[in-house]
Image (cartoon, rainbow, N blue to C red):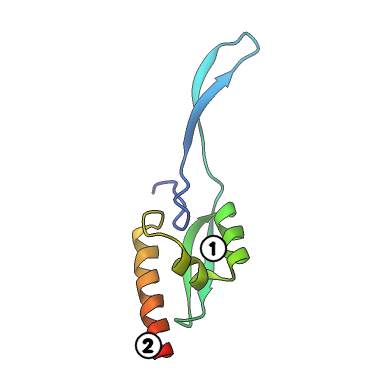
Amino acid sequence: MSRICELTGKGRLVGNNVSHANNKTKRTFLPNLQNVTLISDALGTSVKLRVSTHGLRSVEHVGGLDNWLVKTTDDKLSLRARRLKRDVSKKRTATAA
């Protein structure tokens, strides 16, 4: 399983460990990913996603999962999140009409 946030697209970064003697060795910086269950108000269901803590704070700031999916571009979202976004937008247009 890749270490990428399903909502923000945040992944691992590469850098160096630098010793006191200034020796440099490669290392990776991993995002803080959490398995969370988010509730979709439009669909009325809960969805399990692997989200970074930064992404989780952003979802709460925007006002929930549905608002986040509508406002985010598809290139940042995972395949599951894009399908969820499509379902949410279909449900929103059906209730608005």
In the rendering, at what x and y percent does residue 90 appear?
Answer: 36, 80
Q: Residue at x 56, y 11 (%)?
A: 23
Q: Amino acid at mark 2?
A: Ala
Q: Secondary structure at mark 1?
A: strand
Say which residue label 2 marks: 94
Residue ranking furthest to the top: 21
Q: Which mark is residue 36?
A: 1
Quadrant in which residue 60 is drawn: bottom right
In the rendering, at what x and y percent does residue 38 appear?
Answer: 53, 69
Q: Between disc 1 and disc 2, whose residue precedes?
A: 1
Viewer-side label of 1, 2:
2
Q: Residue at x 40, y 58 (%)?
A: 77
Camera-nearest residue between 24 and 41: 41
Q: Amino acid at mark 1?
A: Val
Quadrant in which residue 73 is drawn: bottom left
In the rendering, at what x and y percent does residue 22 appear?
Answer: 60, 10
Q: Residues within 10 Å of mark 2 (few under 14, many from 20)?
A: few
Residue ranking furthest to the front: 97
